[in-house]
Image: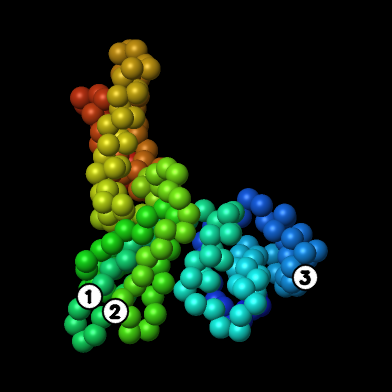
Amino acid sequence: MSQKVNSPYGICLAHNGNLINATELKRFLDLEAHRHINTSSDSELMLNIFANELNETGKARVNDTDIVDALSRMLWLDWVSRLLPSESGVGTDYMMASESVALKQLGFGDFRDILPGEGVIIRKAAAPVFYQIQDRKRYAPDIFEFCYFARPDSVIDGISVNQSRENMGYRLASKIMKTLTPEEVKEIDVIIPIPETSNTSAPFVKNVRQFFCYIAPYGT
């Protein structure tokens, strides 16, 4: 459902996901920052937290350092990896996306992963500038990108999604062989890939038995 959110200082925000501390943030905005929230959208919470941090500078016009400092104080924000491509042609264009296939479809190349805790500022007619906003504590990619969301021909953090799914199928097959007895393995009649993205993994599980007769192609 579409929700109308306010746009403090003319800032716009694109966001995917859910905040685990939305209740606390809304209380802070109401009682301390004195900012009104119009909707139940997590994006609006993030937008107003960011605007409030910028307001703490006391400046009418903020610079890149102010933006980076504001983001660094938003400790509840968990950064995820994104891809930054660039292409030289008539000028230079930049685009950010979670999957490499989206970039390739539009003719972009020269990919650059944005690391955990890293931010990038792209100004008009200028090269992107990267900032390490928060320390990189660990590598924690979204596993669902690899096993479900991403297209198989995508490459994320230098890892082939298709290859990762093949590896998952091999590991699952190994676990089946270790867990079940040979007699129990022979009783397996059907392998149904659910969701459809698991079609890549299914043949490896199928090979647990030499003569499987059927793999449901559409997970039904």
Image point 34% across, 72% down: which residue? Answer: 128
Quadrant that contains the N terminus: bottom right
In the displayed structure, 83 sits above or below 95; it is above
**Residue occupying the point 25% across, 63% down:** 111
Give the labeled residue for mark 3.
34
Which quarter of the figure has residue 219?
top left
- Badge 1 density bin: few <14, some 14–19, many ≥20, Cα 10 Å: some
Residue at the spot of label 2: 93
Circles 1 and 3, Cβ within 8 Å, touching? The answer is no
Q: Looking at the picture, does residue 183 appear above or below residue 114?
A: above
Q: Which residue is mark 1?
A: 87
Percent position of residue 14, x then y: 51, 69
Q: CA distance from mark 2 to mark 3?
A: 39 Å
Residue 142 at x, y percent in the picture: 43, 48
Q: Are marks 2 and 1 in contact (CB under 8 Å)?
A: yes
Image location (x, y in percent) of residue 35: 74, 72
Q: Is residue 219 left or right of residue 41?
A: left
Q: Secondary structure at mark 2?
A: strand
Residue at position x 39%, y 51% in the image: 145
Q: Is residue 66 left or right of residue 81?
A: right
